[in-house]
């Protein structure tokens, strides 16, 4: 019995060594970061659901071709700060916000989030996309949906969409945890990045 176990053990070790030494090593794919972070205008969803509007809006009506546009993806806390961007800086570039809520449970997205987003965007004339299915964040490859982070993209006049800036706000910003000065400080690098392109 002991000899049989030795033979089995040695057979397994021999097989493992054979596989290890003869298997091809996986090819390492090195992607150019600029290629990974650039998306084309045509790959965006064709229609968007906008917070506070009954009908869906066509892509061409929201993000105009031949015009530079800022797109900021965020969640509750971060969007409450991002919506203040035109209050702190002279913004010449039109921009839209994307509510990154696709990871929430279905019933929460249907029953609670729409009202909260309308409340959040009240008094603002900046369009906010209600990204129910996650089409927009999937196209832009946004994987972090924490409530304090935001990711800014710029749509060039030629239709290339590239990542511009990634920022963070204080937890509880929606409930007033940040002063006006702190909000401005959190948005300053985004404004500077936008002006440098």
Image: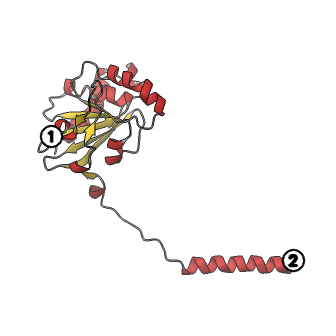
Q: Which quadrant holds the N terminus?
A: bottom right
Pick the front one: 130 or 171:
130
- The image's mark for residue 15 is none
- The image's mark for residue 2 is 2
The residue at the point 43 percent across, 30 percent down is 109
Q: Residue furthest right?
A: 1
Eyeballing the image, is 2 above or below 83?
Answer: below
Is disc 2 in contact with disc 1, using a CB cutoff of under 8 Å?
A: no
Q: Is residue 84 left or right of residue 196?
A: right
Label 1: which secondary element = loop
Percent position (x, y) of residue 162?
A: 24, 48
Q: Colour mode?
A: secondary structure
Is residue 177 among what the camera can see? no
Q: Is residue 129 left or right of residue 15?
A: left
Pick the front one: 132 or 8:
132
Percent position (x, y) of residue 116?
A: 38, 22
Percent position (x, y) of residue 75?
A: 37, 32
Percent position (x, y) of residue 93?
A: 15, 36
Eyeballing the image, is 175 above or below 74?
Answer: above
Of mark 2 and mark 1, the one earlier in the sequence is: 2
Question: How many marks overall?
Answer: 2
Pick the front one: 186 or 153:
153
Eyeballing the image, is 89 above or below 6?
Answer: above
- The image's mark for residue 64 is 1
Q: Quadrant of residue 128?
A: top left
Label 2: which secondary element = helix
Q: Is residue 192 left or right of residue 114?
A: left
Question: Dot 2 surroundings within 10 Å: few (below 14), some, or many (20 or more)?
Answer: few
Q: Which quadrant holds the C terminus?
A: top left
């Amino acid at each position: 019995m002991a000899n049989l176990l030795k033979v089995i053990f040695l057979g397994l070790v021999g097989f493992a060594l054979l596989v290890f030494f003869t298997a091809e090593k996986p090819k390492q794919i090195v992607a150019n970061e600029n290629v990974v972070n650039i998306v084309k205008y045509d790959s965006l969803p064709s229609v968007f659901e906008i917070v506070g509007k009954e009908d869906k809006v066509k892509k061409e009506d929201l993000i105009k071709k031949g015009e530079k546009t800022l797109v900021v993806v965020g969640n509750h806390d971060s969007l409450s700060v991002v919506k203040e961007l035109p209050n702190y800086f002279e913004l010449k570039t039109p921009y839209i916000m994307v509510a990154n809520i696709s990871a929430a449970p279905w019933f929460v997205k249907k029953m609670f989030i729409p009202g909260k987003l309308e409340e959040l965007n009240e008094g603002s004339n900046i369009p906010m996309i209600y990204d129910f299915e996650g089409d927009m964040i999937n196209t832009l490859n946004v994987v972090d949906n924490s409530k304090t982070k935001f990711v800014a993209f710029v749509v060039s006049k030629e239709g290339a969409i590239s990542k511009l800036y990634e920022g963070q706000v204080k937890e509880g910003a929606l409930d007033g945890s940040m002063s006006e000065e702190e909000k401005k400080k959190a948005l300053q690098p985004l404004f500077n990045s936008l002006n440098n392109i």
